[in-house]
Amino acid sequence: MGWAIALHGGAGDIPLSLPLERRLPREETLRRCLNLGVDALKDNQPPLRVVELVVREFENCPHFNAGRGSVLTTDATVEMEACIMEGNTKRCGAVSGLSTVVNAISLARLVMEKTPHIYLAFDGAEAFAREQGVETRDASHFITPENIERLAQAKAANRVQIDYTSPEKPGAGDSQTGTVGCVAVDGCGNLAAATSTGGLVNKMAGRIGDTPIIGAGTYANSVCAVSATGKGETIIRATVGRDVAALMEYKGLSLKDAANYVVESTPSGTVGLVAVSADGEVAMPFNTAGMFRACATEDGESEIAIWHSLGDGA
Amino acid sequence: MGDRRPRRCRRGSSASPERQEEAKRVLRRCLKAGAAALHSGEPAVDAVELVVRELESDPFFNSGRGSVLTRNGTVEMEASIMDGDGRRCGAVSGLSSVKNPVSLARLVMDKSPHSYLAFDGAEIFAREQGVEMVDKSYFITETNVSMLKLAKEANSILYDYRVPETCSTSAHRMNGLAISIYAPETVGCVAVDRHGRCAAATSTGGLLNKMSGRIGDSPLIGSGTYACRACAVSCTGEGEAIIRATLARDVAALMEYKGLGLQEAVDSAVKERLDEGFAGAIAVSAKGEVACGFNTVGMFRAYAKEDGSMEVSIWD
């Protein structure tokens, strides 16, 4: 027992040769986000608040594919999505198709708390954001030069590029970024999960991925909390988030076994996830080359990593 | 083996005998179309699309032609389809001019690199694909407009709309907002073909007087719709409760991970997973079993099997 927190900044084909100038700022952001979450848990803040805080920090940082730094659609626009879920009550909120909201995750929380619905999207979600008075910015806040370049590359390659895929031309662009997410549990076993993303480079306008879908990219109940990253379409059909919990509930697996089973059951190179259980266990499996990730527990375990480490079983 | 269940869930008991007869007539017609498709050897995924198209084209239920209106007086339809064979899936939300949302969901599955398109992007995709588009007047009928007016007067999100129960004794509430009682709504179909392939499809206009942009359970894989090698499931009822319960996936997970039979899995999911929400589910297994479960007063439903048995029913 005891609190625990795990977070990710996307899984994917992250080359071991990732240049330091791209690696260091991301590791630094992971460290800052982890410390923020740990301090909040030590301060007895509810896990729901903790995961929101951490994901907001990620969204405000241009190095990951969420909020500021979101990748561009085929129309060169941003369409951000996010989802948050509280374990004990299974209350949840989700948003898609946001183009001006600075912190998509906080709007998802407002959908959960201030509407009779769970999920609002596109114009209706933007209208709700204005009603609620959340901070909005114009496109220039979200669109970074790197992402304009990445869209151009993806279009040149005439393909939909998964958010974390290496650019075709080595050294061009800066594509090792991904969806962000955070899961947390407090010392009383209260759980929460949150995920936020800009989606896929060169995605069709209107495309919804796994992130805002309860049971796919995001899930929490009284047993565990899960946030997934990777190829959205694969995560949706595998109902990754719910399946980790279902394997624990219906098959009696431990968190680590359940999380590993789910990741191993999906095609290689498609999925990573972070998860915590009610009794403070942490799991961070992935079947991609790497996953930006970090975790900490009350009994002193702490890790910030990108690639498989010895003993990962990779 | 073959079976399908167009179905509808209703709560309360205010459906007039005429409406009940009309519901049964529509269900019977759609059921026959699906059964014929399966008999002639069509794959399950084609059969469920066909049946849901029929249901969408009839103004009786809350999908396609009969879709309810949002708070802004618009229609925002959504649908999804899933082929258990390979767990391929497609979903759409926020459609306002596509005649058959389920067929656009099928095209998202077959013709796009994605599995879910919504709002303007989905409408653009519909035009690109050349599916049948209709004018808003096709959906926005006098009945729908007057029901929205009633809902606004009652300051409620009507869970169902055809017969608002103005003298209802028990005011159900959802997230603190009153909802009405009577509910013909979302349509769905599940089928298993002669090769044991399962498929599911669900289509809806959503909640009457819903906020613009609201997405419910119907397009969400694992919530309103799910199919895998073991079974196919389609749900109906309070969308928010179904989403929290990941109801459709849970029926399948109970079979896969806990070894329950199809009906046991449906019963367990409806009883244990829904919390205080009202909903129902229909399901078929790869073995050709049919199951249904609901914690509402009734659910409009129908099924047919390869042996020729057929049933259309509303109550328990």
Image: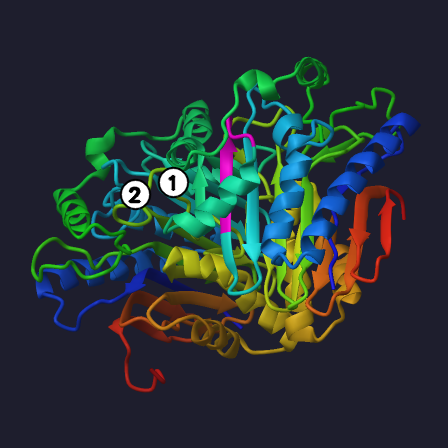
Along the line of sight, which residue is nearer the eye, A283 or A41? A283
The residue depicted at 55 percent of the width and 30 percent of the height is B99
- Give the percent coordinates (x, y) of residue A159: 24, 52
Along the line of sight, which residue is nearer the eye, B100 or A308? B100
Does residue B97 belong to the magenta stretch? yes
- Give the percent coordinates (x, y) of residue B126: 43, 34
- The secondary structure type at the circle numbered 2 is loop
- The secondary structure type at the circle numbered 1 is helix
Q: Is most of the magenta stretch helix, strand or loop? A: strand
The residue depicted at 54 percent of the width and 33 percent of the height is B214
State the image quarter where residue B18 is shown. Answer: top right
B282 sits to left or right of A158: right
Chain letter for mark 2? A
Chain letter for mark 1? A
* Residue A46 seen in the figure: no
Callout 1 environment at 10 Å: few (<14), some (14 to 19), or many (20+)?
many
Q: Are marks 2 and 1 in one subunit?
A: yes
Give the quadrant of the N terminus of chain B.
bottom right
The residue depicted at 60 percent of the width and 44 percent of the height is B217
Tally the marks.
2
**CB contact under 8 Å: marks 2 and 1:** yes
> Compared with residue A160, is residue A20 higher up or lower down, i.e. above or below?
below
Identify the mark at residue A67; answer none if there is no mark: 2
Residue placed under numbered mark 1 in the picture: A104
Along the line of sight, which residue is nearer the eye, A314 or B282? B282
Between the residue at mark 2 and the residue at mark 1, the CA separation in whole angstroms equals: 7 Å
Identify the mark at residue A24; answer none if there is no mark: none
The amino acid marked with disc number 1 is Ala
The amino acid marked with disc number 2 is Gly
Task: Magenta stretch: give its range.
Answer: B90-99
- Give the percent coordinates (x, y) of residue A297: 42, 70
Does residue A196 belong to the magenta stretch? no
